[in-house]
Image (tube, rainbow, N blue to C red):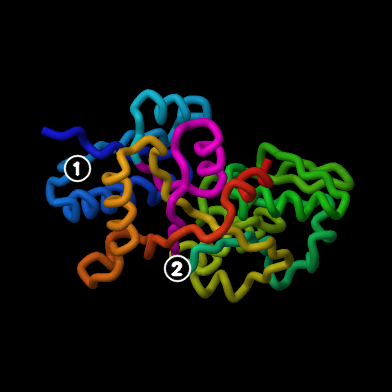
C-alpha cells in the first residue's frame, strides 16, 4: 500500500479550510486512480502558532498545502515547500482590503479614524490587516490593539479590536459597536457575510492594492512525476461539470510573476 498524500492545514481559513481540503483531497485521489497515492491524510494545525506549524510541516513531510499569502510566505521561507499554483476564489486570484464604515458615519476617509476603533478579523492577513495597517500608519496615526470594542483610544491613534469572525466584523460596524471594520474583498462580495441589507448601509473609505491571495504549495523534493501529475490535476480540476462544485475555491492557475520578490516585500 502506498503512502497517503499528506495534506497540511494552517489557520488561514478556520471556517472553510478543512472542508475545502477534504473535498480537494478526495478529488485528487479520485483523479489519481491509485497511481502515486491511493489515500490522503490531513494534518490539522488550525490552532498551532507559526513555529508549531513549521514543525508539523517538517516532521510530517507534508506534500501539499493551500495557504493564504501570509502563511505561504512564511512556509516558503522556513520549509522545503514552495508555491506552484495560484488559487482563484469568486472568479479572481486577486484580493484587496477595504476599510468600511456606515454610510451615515461622519468618517469619510482614513484620516477621520483618529481616536476611533476598527474591527479586524485577524492579524495574519495581508489584504485585511497588513496592507490596511500600512495605509493607516502612512497618515501618521498609530495603529494599536485594544481589548474590547469600547476600549479608550488615545489621540493620534486608531484602535483595532480582533474578532476572528467575518460576520461579527461586519455586524460590529452595522450595529455601531465599532466605528469601522477592515475586511477583504472576498468578504465584501460574499452575501453570506455581507447580506444586502447590511451592505446597502455601508461605505468603503479605504482600498488597498490588490495582491494574489491564495497559493497551492508542494514539496520541493517531491518526485518529479508525482509533482507534475498533481499540478496537472489541480490545473484541470474545474474543467468538468462534475468537479466545478468541489469547494468554494473555483480554480488553479500557473504563477506568472516573481513570487519570491512579493514574499520578500511582505517583511
Check if residue 70 falls in the magenta segment.
Answer: yes
Could you tell me which quadrant the C terminus lies in?
A: top right
Residue sitting at x 47%, y 42%? 82
Q: Under tag 1, what secondary structure?
A: loop
Q: Nearer the viewer, residue 31 or 141?
A: 31
- The residue sitting at 37% across, 23% down in the picture is 59
Residue 120 picture location, percent across and down: 62, 49
**Residue ID for mark 2:** 90
Q: The magenta stretch spans which residues?
A: 64-89
Q: Which mark is residue 251?
A: none
User: Mark 1 = which residue?
Assistant: 36
Residue density around tag 1, few if under 14, some if 14–19, many if 20 or more, within 10 Å: some
Provide residue 174's location: percent of width, then percent of height: 61, 63
- Viewer-nearest of labels 1 and 2? 1
Left/right placement of residue 242 relative to residue 248 reads: left
Quarter of the image where one finds residue 73: top right
Q: Would you say residue 171 is visible in this rendering?
A: no
Q: Decide if residue 32 is on the left or right side of residue 18.
A: left
Task: Give coordinates of residue 47: x percent, y percent.
Answer: 44, 33
Label 2 residue SS:
loop
Q: Residue at x 53, y 74 (%)?
A: 197
Q: How many marks?
A: 2
- Which quarter of the figure is the N terminus placed in? top left
Amino acid at each position: 500500500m502506498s503512502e497517503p498524500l499528506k495534506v497540511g492545514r494552517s489557520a488561514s481559513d478556520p471556517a472553510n479550510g478543512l472542508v475545502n481540503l477534504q473535498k480537494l483531497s478526495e478529488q485528487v485521489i479520485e483523479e489519481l486512480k491509485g497511481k502515486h497515492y491511493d489515500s490522503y491524510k490531513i494534518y490539522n494545525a488550525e490552532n498551532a502558532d507559526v513555529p508549531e506549524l513549521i514543525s508539523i510541516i517538517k516532521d510530517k513531510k507534508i506534500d501539499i498545502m493551500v495557504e493564504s499569502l501570509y502563511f505561504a510566505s512564511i512556509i516558503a521561507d522556513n520549509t522545503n515547500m514552495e508555491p506552484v499554483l495560484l488559487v482563484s476564489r469568486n472568479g479572481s486570484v486577486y484580493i484587496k482590503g477595504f476599510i468600511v464604515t456606515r454610510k451615515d458615519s461622519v468618517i469619510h476617509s482614513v484620516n477621520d479614524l483618529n481616536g476611533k476603533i476598527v474591527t479586524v478579523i485577524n492579524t495574519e492577513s495581508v489584504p485585511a490587516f497588513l496592507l490596511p495597517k500600512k495605509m493607516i500608519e502612512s497618515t501618521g496615526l498609530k495603529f494599536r490593539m485594544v481589548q474590547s470594542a469600547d476600549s479608550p483610544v488615545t489621540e493620534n491613534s486608531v484602535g483595532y479590536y480582533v474578532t476572528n469572525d467575518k460576520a461579527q466584523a461586519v455586524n460590529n460596524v452595522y450595529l455601531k459597536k465599532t466605528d469601522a471594520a477592515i475586511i477583504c474583498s472576498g468578504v465584501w462580495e460574499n452575501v453570506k457575510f455581507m447580506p444586502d441589507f447590511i451592505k446597502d448601509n455601508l461605505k468603503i473609505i479605504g482600498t488597498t492594492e490588490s495582491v494574489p491571495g491564495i497559493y497551492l504549495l508542494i514539496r520541493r523534493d517531491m518526485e518529479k512525476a508525482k509533482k507534475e501529475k498533481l499540478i496537472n490535476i489541480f490545473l484541470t480540476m474545474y474543467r468538468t461539470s462534475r468537479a466545478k462544485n468541489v469547494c468554494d475555491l473555483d480554480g488553479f492557475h500557473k504563477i506568472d510573476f516573481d513570487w519570491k520578490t512579493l514574499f520578500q516585500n511582505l517583511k
